[in-house]
């Protein structure tokens, strides 16, 4: 039965769609291994410092949720199955997910692997009704991918995102309550939500910001609507204050940005046993440089900026960056820069996390590098030394990189590798985790 006109908005009433795949990582693991169906499953780091990235609804019934430390998750659910994650597999599903959305409209903006905003205004001339389009999209994702999702419709990103969350199943008193699947935020519902929602529900309000607002007596969105922006800026900063006050009045000027440009690739690693000393940190950097290099070459890009981030046991962090006049995608070239950056950091304290990120991209074909003798690798300036070594490695290793990539493309990623990828059991293929590392698994005791 079709909705009545008052319940069946036009594109003008609901121009923005947000779709969010349910328990994405865990759902993919269950699809690939049906013996996991019906069991509490999580994807993340299984060790003492691990973090849950995704949890099945069976796990959520026990109170397990994303961003929860794995030790707490296991305490709540002793039978919890924690899997380390396979990003290549998630990316493959994500590409198919994006293809399905693209069939509805080319005006969409991915957020990570499992979320998409879409602008439906181009469908106005086709007389497409948003609710029917959203329901059809949801059915197709289930039929072709085997994945459930929540879809939200609203007049802006703020309400579309809130609606997709509202559309999903929830766990109440340990029991799963099915969601609507698709939710449209009508003007009446907008008013109700702005009056009833806690500030924590707003986009960008994490635990730290929520705590600051709570100290000011601001627990609800309706409270924010009464606050002077300049006063709020003194506590959360001008940009955040402006955004929060706008949200509190239901305004969100962010547009759906088509073809968002990837700004960086990187790999973060939290260690089961903290690292002590320069040698241990540089040894860990070797495998991370290989991960970043593979990610760059897989996207046919080179990077001019390399950033190293170190987090110590006291949870303080230090970052260092170096920007080159040329692009690199060779692991030894990346390592040369990373090593110099690590050496510039005081490592008196134990290192809990190490990250290497690459940014300032060029297309690989636009790099046009050749050996240059303008820089001296014996220079007294460590950064000049690193730049010279990095340039030499980038140029001289080109044939080796191409040969390794060709063999891997034909015979698999574990078919051939370089020394930094060799472990106790042969070539260790570590996938890129970006900036949201899950922490170490149960069996990892060092880099």
Image: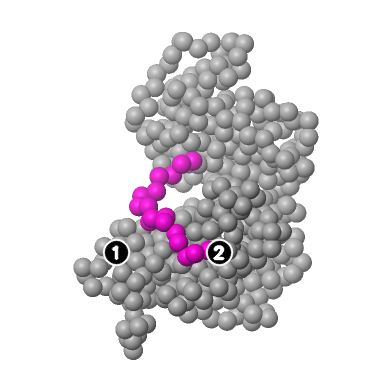
Stretch in magenta = 248-264
Image-based side of 321 in relation to 76, left or right: left
Residue sitting at 69 percent across and 59 percent down? 216
Q: Which quarter of the figure is the C terminus placed in?
A: top right
Which quadrant of the figure contains the N terminus? Answer: bottom left
Which colour scheme appears in the figure?
one colour
Instruction: Give whichever of 221, 210 is nearer the camera.
Output: 221
**Please, what secondary structure does the residue beneath circle 2 have?**
loop
User: How many neighbours does mark 2 have within 10 angstroms: few (below 14), some (14-19), or many (20 or more)?
Assistant: some
- Percent x, y of residue 442: 72, 54
Residues 211 and 317: in front is 211
x and y, in percent, of residue 208 in the image: 67, 54
Q: Which residue is disc 1 drawn over?
A: 121
Question: If you read the primary sequence from the N terminus, does the residue marked by circle 1 or circle 2 appear first?
Answer: 1
In this rendering, which labeled residue sits more in front, label 1 or label 2?
Answer: 2
How far apart are the alpha carbons under marks 1 and 2? 29 Å
Q: Residue furthest bottom?
A: 1
- Residue 360 among magenta residues: no
Residue at the spot 78% in from the left edge and 30% down from the top edge? 348
Q: Position of residue 8 (x, y in %)?
A: 34, 80
* Res 229 seen here: yes
Q: What is the magenta segment's predominant secondary structure?
A: loop
User: What residue is at 32 percent from the left and 58 percent from the top?
Assistant: 107
């Amino acid at each position: 039965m079709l909705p009545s006109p008052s319940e069946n908005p036009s594109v003008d009433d609901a121009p923005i769609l947000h779709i969010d795949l349910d328990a994405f990582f865990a759902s993919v693991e269950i699809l690939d291994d049906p013996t996991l169906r019906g069991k509490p499953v999580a994807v993340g780091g299984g060790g003492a410092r691990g973090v849950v990235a995704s949890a099945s609804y069976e796990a959520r019934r026990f109170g397990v949720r994303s961003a929860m430390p794995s030790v707490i998750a296991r305490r709540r659910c002793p039978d919890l199955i924690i899997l380390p994650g396979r990003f290549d597999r998630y990316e493959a599903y994500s590409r198919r997910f994006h293809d399905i959305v693209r069939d509805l409209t080319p005006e969409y903006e991915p957020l990570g692997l499992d979320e998409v905003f879409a602008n439906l205004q181009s469908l106005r001339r086709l007389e497409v009704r948003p609710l029917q389009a959203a329901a059809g999209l949801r059915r197709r994702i289930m039929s072709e991918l085997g994945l459930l999702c929540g879809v939200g419709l609203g007049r802006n990103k703020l309400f579309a995102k809130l609606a997709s969350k509202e559309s999903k199943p929830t766990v109440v008193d340990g029991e799963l309550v099915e969601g609507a699947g698709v939710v449209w935020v009508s003007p009446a519902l907008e008013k109700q939500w702005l009056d009833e929602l806690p500030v924590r529900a707003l986009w960008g309000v994490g635990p730290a910001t929520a705590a600051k607002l709570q100290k000011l007596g601001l627990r609800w969105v309706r409270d924010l609507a009464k606050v002077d922006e300049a006063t709020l800026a003194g506590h959360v900063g001008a940009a955040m204050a402006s955004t929060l006050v706008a949200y509190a009045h239901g305004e969100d000027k962010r547009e759906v940005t088509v073809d968002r440009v990837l700004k960086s690739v990187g790999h973060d690693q939290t260690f089961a046993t903290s690292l002590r000393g320069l040698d241990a940190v540089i040894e860990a950097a070797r495998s991370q440089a290989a991960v970043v290099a593979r990610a760059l070459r897989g996207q046919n890009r080179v990077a001019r900026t390399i950033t190293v981030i170190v987090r110590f046991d006291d949870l303080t962090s230090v970052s260092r960056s170096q920007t080159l006049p040329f692009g690199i995608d060779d692991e030894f070239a990346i390592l040369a820069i990373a090593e110099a950056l690590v050496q510039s950091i005081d490592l008196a304290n134990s290192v809990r996390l190490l990250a290497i990120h690459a940014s300032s991209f060029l297309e690989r074909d636009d790099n046009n590098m050749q050996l240059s003798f303008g820089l001296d690798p014996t220079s007294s300036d460590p950064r000049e030394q690193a730049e010279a070594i990095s340039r030499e490695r980038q140029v001289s290793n080109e044939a080796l990189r191409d040969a390794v990539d060709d063999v891997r493309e034909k015979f698999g990623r574990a078919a051939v590798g370089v020394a930094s990828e060799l472990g106790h059991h042969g070539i260790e293929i570590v996938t890129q985790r970006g900036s949201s590392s899950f922490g170490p698994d149960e069996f990892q005791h060092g880099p």
